[in-house]
Image (cartoon, rainbow, N blue to C red):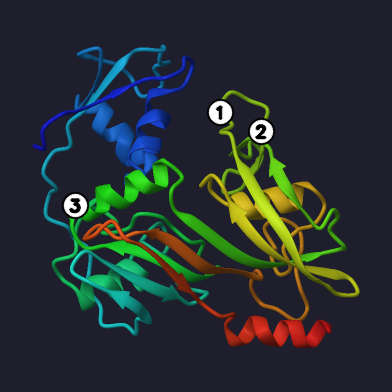
Amino acid sequence: MEAGRNLTVSFSGQRLDVFVTENYPGLSRSRVRKLIDAGCVTVNAQPVKPGHRLEEGDIVTMSIPEPAPSDLVAQKMPLNIVYEDGDLMIVDKPAGLSVHPGAGHPDGTLVNALLGYCPDICGGDVARPGIVHRLDKDTSGLIIVAKNPVSHQYLADQFKNREISKTYIALVKGRLMPEEGFIEAPIGRDRSHRKRMAISTQKSGRSALTGYRVIRYYDKHTLLEVKPETGRTHQIRVHLAAIGHPIVGDNTYGAGSAFLSRQFLHASRLVFRLPSSGMQIEFNSPLPPDLERALYDID
């Protein structure tokens, strides 16, 4: 088991499982709950429940057990790797590819492809080795993959401290005004549809901030550059839908399209520091052909 890591709580009221998930971005919330139930997480040296409400000044100690042998399947699948060193890879993920296995798709994911390419990849959640952040299945673009636990933690800390800049290109319905601004609204699980997220005024809602800038206006659409300042599930999609400008092709949040079979959302730019040197580096990805064609169709 890894040595315990102490974290000091800076404000009161947050659930323990949420707090730990935010501080260990590579671990899913369900995995965190299992660790808490197993006694691997304590508050002021005492075991508590996942829903325990923390107080300012509490000391949360996390000890992660050595990972059990994985039953993930390594698969030989095409990977568009735009950068690789001994610590990480940058992959340009196509739309339609899930990042990790889940209910209904036990294989055929990015994780399976990564294991087929690099069998020793590890770090973070044993069920999704190397994954530091995620992209929705139907979102294309750049994703960072750590190769080892040390680089995984280094990158996870950058995400936690909001030191990694992510930029997306999105096409939304309507004419979004003003041309530049921020959307700030907490996001939580939709109580009526458990697979969806929604703007939430409940305590379970987590703060979320999204910046945007108009690239171009079309007749009935707006092309945007979008920068999420936080990393909530479906954040960009939920925020844009909430202000009346849902992403084109996003059937889940209300903007299906006759000319596009998936949401017009592309992770186009990443800026972060390399684990090996601390040097800041930038990667860019152009719009894939299906999104370029969509712009041509509406022009």
Position of 132 relative to 45 (above/below): below
Residue at the (42%, 19%) spot, across then down: 10
| Cα–Cα gap, marks 2 and 1 | 8 Å
Residue lying farthest to the right in this orientation: 219
Q: Quadrant of residue 292?
A: bottom right
- Which of the two labelled residues, at mark 3 and mark 2, occupies the earlier sequence position? 3
- Which of the two labelled residues, at mark 1 and mark 3, occupies the earlier sequence position? 3
- In the rendering, at what x and y percent does residue 17 appear? 38, 29
Residue 82 seen in render: yes
Looking at the rendered structure, the secondary structure element under dot 2 is: loop
Q: Is 143 placed left or right of 47 in the picture?
A: right
| Cα–Cα gap, marks 3 and 2 | 34 Å
In the rendered structure, are the residues bearing label 2 and label 1 in contact, judged by CB atoms less than 8 Å apart?
Answer: yes
The amino acid beneath tag 3 is Pro
Crowding at dot 2, Cα within 10 Å, few <14 / some 14-19 / many 20+, comes out as: some
Q: Is 121 placed left or right of 8 in the picture?
A: left
**Which quarter of the figure is the C terminus placed in?**
bottom right
Q: Mark 2 highlights which residue?
A: 200
Q: Mark 3 highlights which residue?
A: 149
Position of 196 relative to 18 (above/below): below
Looking at the rendered structure, the secondary structure element under dot 3 is: helix
The amino acid beneath tag 2 is Ser
Crowding at dot 1, Cα within 10 Å, few <14 / some 14-19 / many 20+, comes out as: some
The amino acid beneath tag 1 is Ser
Residue at the (70%, 88%) spot, across then down: 293
In the rendered structure, are the residues bearing label 3 and label 2 in contact, judged by CB atoms less than 8 Å apart?
Answer: no
Rendered image: mark on residue 164: none
In the rendered structure, are the residues bearing label 1 and label 3 in contact, judged by CB atoms less than 8 Å apart?
Answer: no
Q: Mark 1 highlights which residue?
A: 204
Quick one: 147 or 50, which is closer to the camera?
A: 147
- In the rendering, at what x and y percent does residue 269 appear? 51, 67
Looking at the rendered structure, the secondary structure element under dot 1 is: loop
